[in-house]
Image: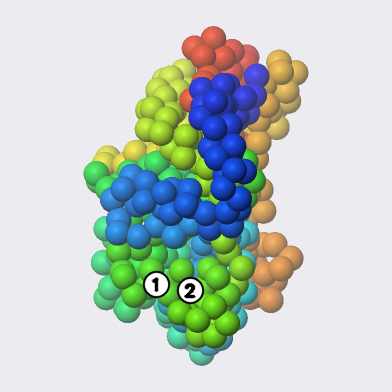
């Protein structure tokens, strides 16, 4: 059994992908070719925003958003410690300081009730609270109504980290449509992934979109050799865009199939482990299907013996990692993140799991 099944997916779209690649090889525009613009138009249409700006990775997408909002030295950016390091890493790269706040224990997403405390913490440290980066962890939307209301009250910019969330929905709106910017990743293991690195930022702001496009290409202006700002090399390869276009055409169907897999998992496991909680009005992209158990190691061992792969995402919350010791956090400062990190593990999740596969996983966990 595969944790993520890219091979079965590829069979559905291989001929279209090969056709796209051949076209790109024929026209030879390997960087920022016509397929890149075509993909951006399709991504914007899918999400329901004005601008989608493709780039080289989800990390660069987050970085471009921070740079476009002119966040830097002396600024504080509030985020969660229960996420991949890239969420916080980009804050440091622009010279700002991350301020971590704990998660909601039911959703594993940032707890909006703690934002005000984080703002005060930043000010006590002599920092300017400038932005917040909520994460759509495992594909589940953060609480955007509350986050945006509090952020507006305190003058914070919102950058949606939807690097796992593309395809999810919050109260009828697609993820990647919240905040000043949203960022996603097309890493191969993501719900929509290419065959290399890739990402995109999304915005409804025309000015911010132009700035992000400039940053993506070394801060370029109208003259190729007169760069108008500091930027980076953040372009998407044309071949990756050519791979994503056929995948995007089957993506809505794959997201629906992920919902069915998750429902069957939850129905079978709800009395055995803590299954994911999906609040009303939310639809997860199911980048991962993650459960909690005090017997995590025993269950994982049993599953491994049965030939079922598992994974543990974020076993060390960011505030406890070596790179962030300088911030002065201690064990116990983020109790919900720390508790989740100790008990969480993820099961195989992809659109091509059969009922037999799901039953095998459920039965093995019950036996353990």
Q: Residue at x 71, y 68 (%)?
A: 323
Query: Do the residues bearing badges 1 and 2 touch, measured as CB atoms within 8 Å?
Result: yes
Q: Residue at x 45, y 23 (%)?
A: 261
Q: Is residue 269 above or below residue 288?
A: above
Q: Residue at x 43, y 19 (%)?
A: 264
Residue 165 placement (x, y as % from top left): 44, 46
Which residue occupies the extreme top position in the image?
Answer: 356
Q: Secondary structure at mark 1?
A: helix
**Camera sees residue 23:** yes
> How many C-alpha atoms fall within 10 Å of the one at disc 1: few (<14), some, or many (≥20)?
some
Which residue is the site of mark 1?
Answer: 210
Quarter of the image with the C terminus in it: top right
Which residue is the site of mark 2?
Answer: 214
Numbered circles on residues, count: 2
**Camera sees residue 88:** no
Q: Residue at x 33, y 45 (%)?
A: 46
Q: Secondary structure at mark 2?
A: helix
Q: Mark 1 and mark 2: span between their CA atoms?
A: 6 Å
Q: Nearer the viewer, residue 326 or 281?
A: 281
Image check: 111 left or right of 92?
Answer: left
Q: Hey, which quadrant is residue 194 in on the image?
A: top right
């Amino acid at each position: 059994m595969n944790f993520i099944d890219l091979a079965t997916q590829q069979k559905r779209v291989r001929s279209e992908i090969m056709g796209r690649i051949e076209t790109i090889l024929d026209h030879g525009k390997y960087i920022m070719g016509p397929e890149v613009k075509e993909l951006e138009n399709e991504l914007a249409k899918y999400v329901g925003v004005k601008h989608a700006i493709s780039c080289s990775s989800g990390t660069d997408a987050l970085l471009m958003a921070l740079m476009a909002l002119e966040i830097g030295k002396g600024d504080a950016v509030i985020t969660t410690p229960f996420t991949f390091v890239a969420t916080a890493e980009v804050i440091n790269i622009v010279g700002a300081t991350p301020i971590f706040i704990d998660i909601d224990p039911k959703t594993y997403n940032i707890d909006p009730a703690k934002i005000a405390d984080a703002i005060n913490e930043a000010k006590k440290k002599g920092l300017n609270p400038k932005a917040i980066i909520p994460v759509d962890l495992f594909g589940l939307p953060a609480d955007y109504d509350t986050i945006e209301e509090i952020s507006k009250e305190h003058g914070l910019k919102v950058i949606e980290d939807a690097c796992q969330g593309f395809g999810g929905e919050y109260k009828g709106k697609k993820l990647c449509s919240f905040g000043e910017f949203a960022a996603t990743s097309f890493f191969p293991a993501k719900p929509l992934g290419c065959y290399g690195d890739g990402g995109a930022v999304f915005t409804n702001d025309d000015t911010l979109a132009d700035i992000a496009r400039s940053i993506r290409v070394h801060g370029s202006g109208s003259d190729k050799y007169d760069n108008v700002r500091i930027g980076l090399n953040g372009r998407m390869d044309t071949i990756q865009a050519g791979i994503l276009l056929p995948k995007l055409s089957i993506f809505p169907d794959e997201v629906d199939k992920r919902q069915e897999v998750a429902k069957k998992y939850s129905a079978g496991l709800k009395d055995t482990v803590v299954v994911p909680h999906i609040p009303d009005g939310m639809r997860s992209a199911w980048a991962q299907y993650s459960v909690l158990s005090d017997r995590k190691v025993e269950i994982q061992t049993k599953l491994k013996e049965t030939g079922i792969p598992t994974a543990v995402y974020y076993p060390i919350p960011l505030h406890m990692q070596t790179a962030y010791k300088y911030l002065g956090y201690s064990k116990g400062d983020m109790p919900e993140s720390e508790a989740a990190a100790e008990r969480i593990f993820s099961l195989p999740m992809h659109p091509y799991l059969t009922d037999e596969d799901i039953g095998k996983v459920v039965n093995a966990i019950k036996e353990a």
